[in-house]
Amino acid sequence: AARGSDGVGFDAMIEAHRAWRGKLVEAIDGRGETLDPDRICADNACTLGKWIHGPGKALAAAREYVDLRDKHAQFHRCAGEVLRLALNGDRTGASNKLAGEFSELSTQTVGAIRMMKVRSNGTGQTAKAS
């Protein structure tokens, strides 16, 4: 993933997580790429997840890290649930979960990424994603 001036690539991670909404809308509408709910539920497969479960652990004592780890895991679990509903033909249920819980978790996850970016910049930590 592209890294911005923040060293780790938090800005690209924010954009990648914002893009999930569009992917899920496409899945609900029966178009777009084929997605696997089990893979989406995994919070350690994306660039951010690899950082959280890898180099980011250097900041594990920070409140911001704990919040980011938890929100990110909830985000991916919810995204997987939206997709499962869509794949099972429950477009209304999927749309409702997307508009409600997923949107809230998306906002919280993006906020947690921003807070972690501030925290990691403030410590001089250069935990680069691999």
Image (spheres, rainbow, N blue to C red):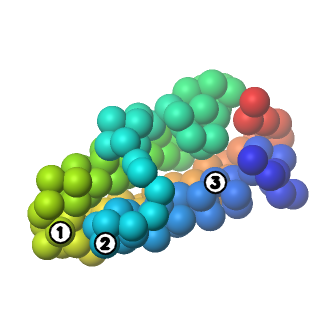
Q: Amino acid at mark 2?
A: Asp
- In this view of the protein, can residue 30 be seen by the observer? yes
Q: Which mark is residue 91?
A: 1
At mark 3, the secondary structure is helix
At mark 2, the secondary structure is loop
Dot placed on the residue nearer the N-terminal end, 2 or 3? 3
Residue in the picture at 75% in, 47% down = 1
> For this view, does 44 lie left or right of residue 105?
right
Q: According to the image, label 2 marks what residue?
A: 29
Which is more toward the observer, 65 or 11?
11
Dot placed on the residue nearer the N-terminal end, 3 or 1? 3
Look at the numbered discs 2 and 1 and tell me whether their residues touch, using CB distance below 8 Å: yes
Q: Amino acid at mark 3?
A: Met
x and y percent of residue 60 in the render?
55, 29
x and y percent of residue 49 in the render?
55, 37
Quadrant for the C terminus, please. Answer: top right
Between the C-alphas of marks 3 and 1, the distance is 28 Å
Residue in the picture at 45% in, 64% down = 32
> For this view, does 119 lie left or right of residue 98?
right
Vertically, is 110 above or below 66? below
- In this view of the protein, can residue 21 be seen by the observer? no
Observer-side mark, 2 or 3, equals 2
Q: According to the image, label 3 marks what residue?
A: 13
Look at the numbered discs 2 and 3 and tell me whether their residues touch, using CB distance below 8 Å: no
